[in-house]
């Protein structure tokens, strides 16, 4: 079997081992040489190798970190090329361990299957951490496929998400560096902490989406660079809070608020791209219990930046920062202002006419004369 590693020439020194059997429900399936083709030797595939999964073998693959071979299982990269769902997990009942991804040729994880999920998971009783030794790509080719990591992820350099499919992070992670969403969707969904709390910058490129599934997934110092992509808020019956660093607008992009309430750091010192537009959708406004709000703080955006904001649901170009917390809100449009002025003018005219009639009725009997002209404001033809 030939496995193509995206992003770099194939490393001829790397050995490819294809999963061929073994129940992953117990024991040490990953480190059993007989479960790989060709036989991976003692300990299974390791440093600099490619662990490949196709149509053969069990769907669950356990790593027993208490088998005497160490608490770290290193691998160059993991590839799901075809077949159904696969889950790699800690099968040890007494020892936590770490799956170390070395980013062979710049590739950390690769899912090429047309409709399948590759999952890296904790065990029933023990955790399996995932360590990204260096920066690399996590690629999901098909829109119907995904990679799910519910283990805690560590690493100094972040990663780049590529391909049209989904990457979902469910662990509380300690990643450093920067993260780029170059294609498809990155969903951050930790339940008790932040998925990207230690990352310095997240960049969302054209056609890509960063989705906030649960609350507070970014760090308060994690800057966001929208470079043509979409920041999509949470969905649910109540508001979901999110706090982030500064917002950069490198290309025209969208923030789809949904039920999220997003607070950015003061971004007035950041120069947004000339001629770019920040489109806001699903904005709900002040005190809505279902969220749909965004804050920058008082003075948190310049007048130039505010003019680049477009509220698409309302068809309003331009924004203002209102209230004590600097909520981003649409400015009144000129047609709205004109309509309000016209309404005020009509009310004034009507009241003047009513008062004139009252004066006429009072004066006419006293002077014994005929009433004044009924309406001096009426045209000659009317």
Image (cartoon, rainbow, N blue to C red):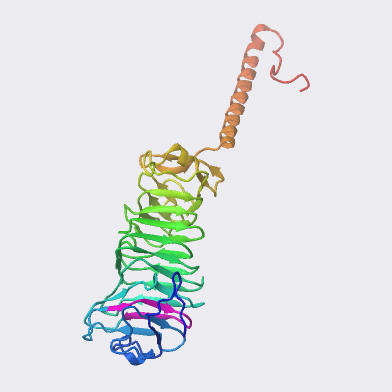
Q: In the picture shown, does residue 245 fall above or below 375? A: below
Residue 88 at x, y = what percent? 35, 80
Tell me if residue 94 can be seen. Answer: yes
Q: In the picture shown, does residue 311 fall above or below 338? A: below
Tell me if residue 22 can be seen. Answer: no
Closer to the camera in the image, 164 or 350: 164
Residue 345 at x, y = what percent? 60, 26
Furthest toward the front, the residue is 12
Furthest toward the top, the residue is 367
Residue 258 at x, y = what percent? 46, 56
At x 42%, y 56%, the residue is: 203
At x 51%, y 47%, the residue is: 277
348 on left or right of 53: right
Residue 52 at x, y = what percent? 41, 82
Closer to the camera in the image, 49 or 259: 49
* Magenta-colored span: 73-89
Q: In the picture shown, does residue 207 fall above or below 58? A: above
Assess whether residue 164 is covered by the magenta stretch. Answer: no
Q: In which quarter of the image is the C terminus?
A: top right
Furthest toward the right, the residue is 381
């Amino acid at each position: 079997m030939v496995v193509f590693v995206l992003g770099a020439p194939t490393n001829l020194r790397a050995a490819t081992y294809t999963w061929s059997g073994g129940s992953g429900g117990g024991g040490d399936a990953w480190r059993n040489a007989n479960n790989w083709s060709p036989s991976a030797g003692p300990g299974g595939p390791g440093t600099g190798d490619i662990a490949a999964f196709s149509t053969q073998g069990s769907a669950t693959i356990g790593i027993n970190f208490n088998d005497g071979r160490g608490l770290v299982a290193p691998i160059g990269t993991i590839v799901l090329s075809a077949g159904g769902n696969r889950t790699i997990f800690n099968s040890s009942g007494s020892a936590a361990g770490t799956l170390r991804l070395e980013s062979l040729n710049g590739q950390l994880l690769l899912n090429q299957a047309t409709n399948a999920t590759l999952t890296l998971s904790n065990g029933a009783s023990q955790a399996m951490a995932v360590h990204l030794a260096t920066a690399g790509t996590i690629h999901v080719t098909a829109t119907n496929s995904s990679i799910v990591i519910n283990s805690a992820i560590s690493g100094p350099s972040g990663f780049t998400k590529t391909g049209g499919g989904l990457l979902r992070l469910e662990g509380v992670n300690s990643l450093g560096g920067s993260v780029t969403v170059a294609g498809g969707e990155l969903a951050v969904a930790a339940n008790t902490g932040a998925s990207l709390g230690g990352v310095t910058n997240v960049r969302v490129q054209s056609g890509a989406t960063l989705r906030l599934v649960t609350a507070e997934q970014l760090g308060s110092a994690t800057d966001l660079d929208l470079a043509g992509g979409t920041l999509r808020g949470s969905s649910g019956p109540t508001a979901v809070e999110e706090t982030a660093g500064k917002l950069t607008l490198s290309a025209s992009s969208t923030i789809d608020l949904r039920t999220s309430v997003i607070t950015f750091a003061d971004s007035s010192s950041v120069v947004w791209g000339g001629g770019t537009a920040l489109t806001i959708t699903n904005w709900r406004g002040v005190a809505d219990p279902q969220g749909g709000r965004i804050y920058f703080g008082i003075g948190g955006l310049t007048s130039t930046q505010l003019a680049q904001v477009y509220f698409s649901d309302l068809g309003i170009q331009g924004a203002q920062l209102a209230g004590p917390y600097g909520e981003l809100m649409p400015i009144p449009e000129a047609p709205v202002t004109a309509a309000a002025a016209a309404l005020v003018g009509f009310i004034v005219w009507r009241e003047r006419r009513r008062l004139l009639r009252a004066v006429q009725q009072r004066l006419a009997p006293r002077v014994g004369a005929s009433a004044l002209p009924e309406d001096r404001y009426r045209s000659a033809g009317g």
